[in-house]
Image (tube, rainbow, N blue to C red):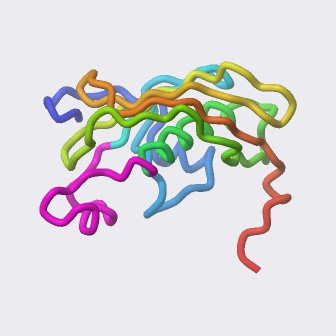
């Protein structure tokens, strides 16, 4: 549901997202996908709840979703667009760069953040996408994300 109470139709819920990307609580920053064209574009949503772990300290009495987490949520959405491609099975998407990101308005508890990424280039293991994050149609952040796709077993987790 949005903060206006309208129901959002999902093409992929959290369980479906977890089947694509390795992120889990408390760092999975997507609640669902409303549009998905593998390798092309994606639209995801994040319902910013008042009990989000990061809001207690950012900022007490004036909670705002940190900009770096908005960018991470965009990246997670973009990773879903890539990892939903059959050719990407067993892969992991990593940040390669963050360019021209601008924050336009604060994102607060109760907001539904709409995260849209259009993949505009993939060459070998490196690609790029343009992202926007909006709340109620108002731009909250935008920028260009560069990514690298690697085999999941190439990245050692824990040691």
Q: Nearer the viewer, residue 55 or 37?
A: 55
Which quadrant would the C terminus be assigned to in this image? bottom right
- The location of residue 136, given as percent across then percent down, is 23, 26
Instruction: Tell me the quarter of the picture where residue 126 sits.
Output: top right
Residue 77 higher or lower than 132, as above or below: below
Q: Nearer the viewer, residue 140 or 41?
A: 140
Q: Is residue 114 rendered to the left or right of residue 81? A: left
- The location of residue 59, given as percent across then percent down, is 23, 62
Which quadrant would the N terminus be assigned to in this image? top left
Q: Is residue 31 visible?
A: yes
Is residue 62 within the magenta segment? Answer: yes
Q: Is residue 80 visible?
A: no
Residue at (45, 50) in percent of width and height: 68
Residue 1 higher or lower than 53, as above or below: above
Instruction: Tell me the quarter of the picture where residue 7 sits.
Output: top left
Residue 6 higher or lower than 18, as above or below: above
Residue at (79, 67) in percent of width and height: 156
Given the current orientation, which residue lies at the most extreme bottom position?
159
Q: Is residue 21 rendered to the left or right of residue 51? A: right
- The location of residue 89, given as percent across then percent down, is 77, 41
Q: Is residue 39 rendered to the left or right of residue 18? A: right
Instruction: Tell me the quarter of the picture where residue 124 sits.
Output: top right
Tally of numbered tags:
0
- The location of residue 20, given as percent across then percent down, is 62, 44
> Mostly what secondary structure, the magenta segment?
loop
Residue at (26, 41) in percent of width and height: 106
What segment is highlighted magenta in the picture? 47-68
Residue at (67, 36) in percent of width and height: 146
Q: Nearer the viewer, residue 47 or 75?
A: 75
Q: Nearer the viewer, residue 116 or 97?
A: 97
């Amino acid at each position: 549901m949005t903060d206006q109470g309208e129901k959002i139709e999902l093409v992929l819920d959290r369980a479906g997202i977890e089947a694509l990307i390795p992120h889990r609580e408390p760092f999975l920053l997507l609640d669902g996908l409303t549009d998905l064209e593998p390798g092309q574009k994606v639209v995801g949503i994040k319902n910013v709840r008042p009990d989000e772990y990061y809001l207690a300290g950012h900022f007490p009495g004036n909670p705002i979703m940190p900009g770096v987490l908005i960018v991470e949520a965009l990246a997670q959405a973009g990773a879903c667009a890539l990892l939903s491609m059959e050719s990407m099975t067993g892969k992991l998407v990593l940040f390669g760069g963050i360019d021209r990101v601008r924050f336009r308005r604060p994102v607060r508890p109760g907001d539904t953040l709409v995260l849209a990424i259009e993949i505009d280039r993939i060459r070998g293991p490196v690609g790029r996408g343009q992202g926007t994050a909006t709340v109620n149609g108002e731009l909250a952040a935008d920028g260009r994300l560069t990514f690298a796709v690697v085999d999941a077993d190439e990245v050692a987790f824990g040691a």
